Image: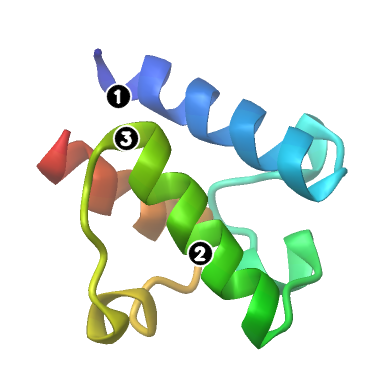
Amino acid sequence: MDKQELIEKVNAVLAEEFEVEVSDITPEGDIKKTLQLDSLSLVDMVALIENEFSVKIKSTEISQIKTFAALYDFLAERV
C-alpha cells in the first residue's frame, strides 16, 4: 500500500466511523476537533486504527499525533 492509498483508507474509515465528510479531513486538520473526539471516542479511534492497520499505538505516541498528517506519517512508517 503506498502512502496515497493509506491516506485514502484512513480518511474513509474515520469518516464512516465518526460520521464526518471525507472532505472535512485535511492533512493539517486537528484530529480531535475534526472528528469531535472526547477522551472516550479517542480510545475508540485508536482501537479502530489498530484493528484496521494491524499496528499498536502506545498512549505516549497518540498524545503526540495531533493532525491527520502526523497520523498518516505514523502509519506509513509501520504498515
Task: Quadrant for residue 72, please give it.
Answer: top left
Quarter holding the C terminus?
top left
Mark closer to the chain start, 3 or 1 = 1
Would you say 71 lies left or right of 2 here?
right
Is any part of residue 30 visible from this angle?
no
| CB contact under 8 Å: marks 3 and 1 | no
Q: Give how far apart the Cα atoms at labels 3 and 1 are.
A: 13 Å
Residue at point 25%, 13% (across, down):
1
Badge 2 marks a residue whose secondary structure is loop
Would you say 70 lies left or right of 74 here?
right
Would you say 67 lies left or right of 32 here?
left
- Rate crowding at label 2 as few (under 14), some (14 to 19) or many (20 or more) other CA atoms within 10 Å: some
Residue at point 26%, 64% (across, down):
57
Task: Quadrant for residue 51, please give it.
Answer: top left
Q: Which residue is mark 2?
A: 67
The percent position of residue 31, horizontal first and vertical second, equals 61, 65
Q: Nearer the viewer, residue 29 or 60?
A: 60
Badge 3 marks a residue whose secondary structure is helix
Kindly identify the amino acid type of the residue bearing the numbered disc 2.
Thr
Kindly identify the amino acid type of the residue bearing the numbered disc 1.
Lys
In this view, the mark in front (2 or 3): 3
Q: Which residue is mark 3?
A: 53
Label of residue 3 in the image: 1
Badge 1 marks a residue whose secondary structure is helix
The percent position of residue 6, horizontal first and vertical second, equals 38, 25
Mark closer to the chain start, 2 or 1 = 1
Residue at point 32%, 35% (across, down):
53
The percent position of residue 12, horizontal first and vertical second, equals 64, 27
In this view, the mark in front (3 or 1): 3
Residue at point 76%, 32% (across, down):
22
